Each structure stands twice: as structure tokens, then as C-alpha cells.
Amino acid sequence: VPQVNTISVKWSKGLQFNVHDEHGHTMIIDANKQVGGFDEGFHPAELLLVSLAGCMSMDIVSIVQKKGGQITSFETTIQGQRAEKHPKRFEKITLTFVCKGDYKRSDLLRAFELSRDKYCGVSATLRNAPDIEFKI
Amino acid sequence: VPQVNTISVKWSKGLQFNVHDEHGHTMIIDANKQVGGFDEGFHPAELLLVSLAGCMSMDIVSIVQKKGGQITSFETTIQGQRAEKHPKRFEKITLTFVCKGDYKRSDLLRAFELSRDKYCGVSATLRNAPDIEFKI
């Protein structure tokens, strides 16, 4: 049986929506005031960046620790460059990982490669587009 | 000058991270307890679904309203089916839009098509993979 994740996104006011996952978490997503939002939550397109950076960061921290590394801080910065014209897709994404602590550099590099190539489902989805079906 | 979005993802504890966008919003992302998380926030891969559903929902609500429609409720359900083997990419995504209120059905369908084909940057990024660069 394939694993299915379900998310619901419900309109609240302006361009603000309440989001629920199936594990009981909730969040607000919103848009800039200039386009009719209240700017009270993360913007949808930027959550694509959160998704990729979060997925790879979790993999890397987890793998370095499993190899016996002691991490004292770990921070990922992700930058997404948008096309100038609509739909303003992300043309180029840059991730910068900064890991501090007592670990082997080779373990960090291996953890990064394993995430990129083998474990991170977000990275794999961006490389290999899913089929998308709509009901309206 | 192309628009660039920047997000920072900073390790907190277990597999939990604090996320900051450049507009002052913060959120927690986390993983299941089974894999070493505290399950106190959205999971990264599921945020890919939030991103796509949110982006298209905002487009559709905005366009229907600009065409004079009165929306009383709008809810999008998005389901992502994962591959069984690592990296468990999303193989198939299904979006279901439910719009209630006083509007023309043809306006809703046109708004949906405009989002899918012309306005939604997330949809466009999933169709046309970005270049991804890493610094570590």
C-alpha cells in the first residue's frame, strides 16, 4: 500500500488560508498586503524552499549523528531566484549548509550526497516531476 | 534585477528546526518521533504539498473575486502519493478544489486554468525543474 499524505488548505480572509496536516499541526499561509493578503504567515512559493531545505537538513543532521558526529549548530540558508515573468518559477535554487561541532568532514560530505541522491524525497520530486491531477 | 527569496532553517533539537523567512515570519518544522523528531511541526515533504495547494488556492480565490464572484468558502485538499522506496518521491499529486458562493462556474474553471498554466510559480517549478546548487 503506497503512503499518501493529505493536507487541507481552507480560505480564512483576504488571501489568508488555514492549513491542516493529518498529524494535527496547523499553520497560516498568507500573501503580501500589496496583493490582498494580511502578511501574517509564510507565502506558499517560499514554502517550497522550506520544504527542500528542511528535508535535506534533517537527513544531513541525522546521518552525521548516526556516524558518531557531535553537532553543536547546523544552519541551512536557501535562496530561490525567480523568473522575471509570470509564473515566476524558481529558476535557480542555492543551498548553503553550515555545520559546527566535532565530526569528520568526510562524514558531512557523504551525508549531504546521500540526502541529495538517495534519501530526500523533495529533491527527488523536483528532479522528477510528479503526475498532477485536478478535481474542481 | 531578478527576485530572490531567502529562507533560513536552523537546527533546534532532535530533528526539529526553526525556520525564518525574510518577511519576519517564523515556524517550526519537525519529524515523526519514530525517526527522532518531536512531531511539533509540519514535516518538510508535506510542505511541498502546502506550497502547491496554497499557491493555486490564492490564485483561484483572487481571480474569481476579481471577476465579481462572491466566495463564502473555499477549501483545497491535496494528496501526495509517495513512492514505496527511498527517496519516496511524490509520484502522484491530486488536488481537489471546493468553492462555495455566488460565482460563475466558467469563471472558476478559467481561474483554475490560469493558475495552473500561467500564474502559479510552484506548479511551474514542479513542471520545469530548477537548477540546484549546493555549498557545504
Image (tube, coloured by chain):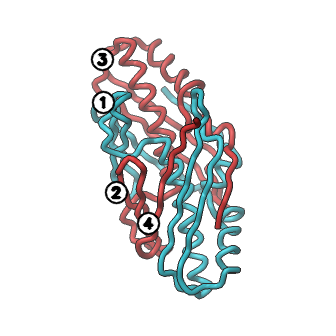
Chain colours: A red, B cyan
Q: Is residue A119 left or right of residue A105?
A: right
Give the position of the C terminus of chain A as an image quadrant: bottom right
| Mark 2 neighbour class, 10 Å CA radius: few under 14, some 14 to 19, many 20 or more | few
Contact flag, marks 2 and 4 (Cβ < 8 Å): no
Taking depth in this image into account, of A127 and B93 the one nearest to the observer is B93
Question: In this rendering, which labeled residue sits more in front, label 1 or label 2?
Answer: 1
Marked residue chain, label 4: A
Taking depth in this image into account, of A6 and B37 the one nearest to the observer is A6
Picture coordinates of residue A53, whole percent (x, y): 47, 38
Q: Which of marks 4 and 3 is nearer the N terminus?
A: 4
What amino acid is at disc 2? Gly
What amino acid is at disc 1? Gly
| Mark 1–mark 2 distance (CA, rounded to whole Å) | 24 Å
Picture coordinates of residue B114, whole percent (x, y): 69, 69
Residue A70 image label: 3
User: Looking at the image, which residue is at 70% across and 80% down?
Assistant: B106
What amino acid is at disc 3? Gln
Is label 4 on the same chain as label 3?
yes
What amino acid is at disc 4? Phe
Question: In this rendering, which labeled residue sits more in front, label 1 or label 3?
Answer: 1
The residue carrying mark 4 is A17
Q: Earlier in the sequence, mark 1 or mark 2?
A: 1
Contact flag, marks 2 and 3 (Cβ < 8 Å): no
Considering the numbered disc 2 on the image, is that residue within a helix, a strand or a loop?
Answer: loop
User: Looking at the image, which residue is at 57% across and 33% down?
Assistant: B88
Q: Is residue A125 left or right of residue A107?
A: right
